[in-house]
Image (spheres, grey):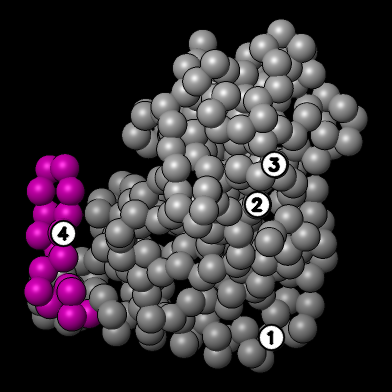
Amino acid sequence: MDRIDQLRIFIRVADSGGFTLAADQLGLPRPTVSLAIQQLEARLGTRLFNRTTRRVGLTQDGEALLERAVALVADTEELEQRFRPQAQALSGRLRVDLPSRIARRQVAPALPTFFEQHPGIELDLGSSDRAIDLVHEGIDCALRVGELPSSSLVAQPLGTFRLINCASPAYLARHGVPRTPADLPRHLAVNYATPNYGRAAAWEWEEHGRLQTLTMRAQVSVNNAETYIACCLAGLGLIQIPAFDVREHLEAGELVEVLPGWAAPAMPVQIVYPHRRHLSRRVRAFNGWLAQVLAPCLA
């Protein structure tokens, strides 16, 4: 194993916080990962990790090495790619995480065009509505919708999703059509509880330039975008949803927009990745492609 491969393993162990997890992410036997770190420490003459039964953490020398190692590996990969034939310009494994509905409806159908451009890349595509820990899971980049909590992640803004309020014709026939926010206390909503926090999001709208919120009555709460829309189609209440996500339902008359003058603020959309000075060309290529795929949906 050459020195660059040892540094790649060192970076993965540092990011994941464990030898076993790093081995799984790299597709290597655990003894191979342990041996690589032992050889690297022997050659450098210093201990890089403090090991416990559950987790490993970087020593002071390990911290000092990590930033230089990330830069060196990224520069090496870019140099290697520059001299490869164009058809094999980019290669290797890329781990990406996307919201489930966007992955299914926008990204997956368009993936053949990405692989036509980059046939050497192998993509591990995770999809959920839960904001996972990119570093711990070994994710190269992820798509996030909504305001980001404070973190060390680097964000690349793409635009915003315009939100609309809608309901099914069956619901409106039973409960009437809300005309202003003053009508909302007499209505039901389908509550969306974020998977990470489990709390139902309040109903929101902008009025005279100020954000207004209301806790709506609900008979059902969900934590998945697909189920959220399905419950609305079933007549269980009002929802607030990105306009592009229900365009077909609106055109087919299966859903109806309500309160068009009182929409919630647009939701920011961004690609995020672990805080590193260098991004691999694989990540930059995927980010650029993803931005193009989502452009028609963005405001």
Note whether residue 270 is visible: yes
Q: Is residue 281 left or right of residue 203?
A: right
Residue 237 location (% of width, % of height): 62, 19
Dot in front, 4 or 1: 4
Q: CA distance from mark 4 to mark 3?
A: 52 Å
Residue at image mark 4:
57
Q: Which residues are magenta?
A: 49-65
Residue 162, disc: 2
Residue at image mark 1:
84
Q: CA distance from mark 3 to mark 2?
A: 12 Å
The earlier-in-sequence mark between 2 and 1 is 1
Q: CA distance from mark 2 to mark 4?
A: 42 Å
Residue at image mark 3:
260
Task: Give the residue type at disc 4.
Answer: Gly
Residue 94 location (% of width, % of height): 56, 61
* Crowd around label 3: few <14 · some 14–19 · many ≥20 (10 Å): few
Q: CA distance from mark 4 to mark 1?
A: 36 Å
Residue at the spot 12% in from the left edge and 43% down from the top edge = 53
Q: CA distance from mark 1 to mark 3?
A: 53 Å
The earlier-in-sequence mark between 4 and 3 is 4
Element type at mark 3: loop
